[in-house]
Amino acid sequence: AQSVTQLGSHVSVSEGALVLLRCNYSSSVPPYLFWYVQYPNQGLQLLLKYTSAATLVKGINGFEAEFKKSETSFHLTKPSAHMSDAAEYFCAVRQMNTGFQKLVFGTGTRLLVSP
Amino acid sequence: DGGITQSPKYLFRKEGQNVTLSCEQNLNHDAMYWYRQDPGQGLRLIYYSQIVNDFQKGDIAEGYSVSREKKESFPLTVTSAQKNPTAFYLCASMLGHLSNEQFFGPGTRLTVL
């Protein structure tokens, strides 16, 4: 079975600082990995996804993530945080069950951005 | 615009009552999902459906029921057997089993009084 672990339930940064949200995965097969963002009382929006092509994946809103097999990691980064980036971020891995796929989510990391 | 709608946005229920949460999509997606979200626990899968008239239990199906009579609709009923139903419920859909992206609705917040 596949799983993901997000380190840190809360991350605080100043506006303009580097954003780094950590995600480590466990998978017996080459994984498909995803980062989603959730604003308060809203659904989830896909930021980016890794599907075994380029290891450096660029997403929306200036975010990117790098797949590192040797470290089983898929950390999310953004060079300069904006106030509007304050939200909860979820890492997820695809799990295939008898031809049907589902997503297994991490517990989430809340990003706080201070002026 | 194509998308997923969930209604109502907020729902209050008395203990012992069944309630039904609506999920509708006009994306022509085959697969639909229901998740429950609790603080600090991420999203947990309740039920999923690959095609009309077929659905499967997810990881936490006890106390919930679903139906899939139409491709675009996947309502979730929270029954009185669900011991702790207060949560945020999210519906999602995906084009098919070869797709890689799930699209999410805006969610319904259920509170048991």
Image (cartoon, rainbow, N blue to C red):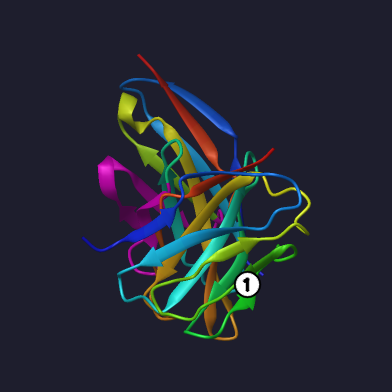
Picture residue at 32% right of the left edge, 43% below the top: A63
**Which sits in the foreground, B47 or A7?**
B47
Q: Taking A37 as reference, is A67 above or below it? A: below
Q: Quadrant of the C terminus of chain A?
A: top left
Residue A29 lies in quadrant: bottom right
**Which sits in the foreground, A40 or A10?**
A40
Q: Position of residue B72 (x, y in %)?
A: 38, 74
**Residue A34 sits inside the magenta stretch:** no
Q: Quadrant of the N terminus of chain A?
A: bottom right
Q: Position of residue A39 (x, y in %)?
A: 41, 38
* Magenta stretch in the rendered image: A43-72
**Which sits in the foreground, B80 or B39?**
B80
What amino acid does circle 1 point to?
Ser
Q: Is A114 displayed left or right of A5 in the figure? A: left
Q: Position of residue B99 (x, y in %)?
A: 38, 75
Q: Is residue A39 visible?
A: yes
Picture residue at 53% right of the left edge, 86% below the top: B53
Disc 1 crowd, CA 10 A, few/some/many (<14, 14-19, 20+): few
Picture residue at 55% right of the left edge, 84% below the top: B54
Q: Position of residue A27 (x, y in %)?
A: 61, 67
Q: Residue furthest left?
A: B1
Pointer 1 chain:
A
Residue marked by disc 1? A28
**Residue A45 sits inside the magenta stretch:** yes
Q: Is residue A69 visible?
A: no
Q: Taking A100 as reference, is B64 above or below it? A: above
Q: Secondary structure at mark 1?
A: loop
Q: Is B7 displayed left or right of A4 in the figure? A: left
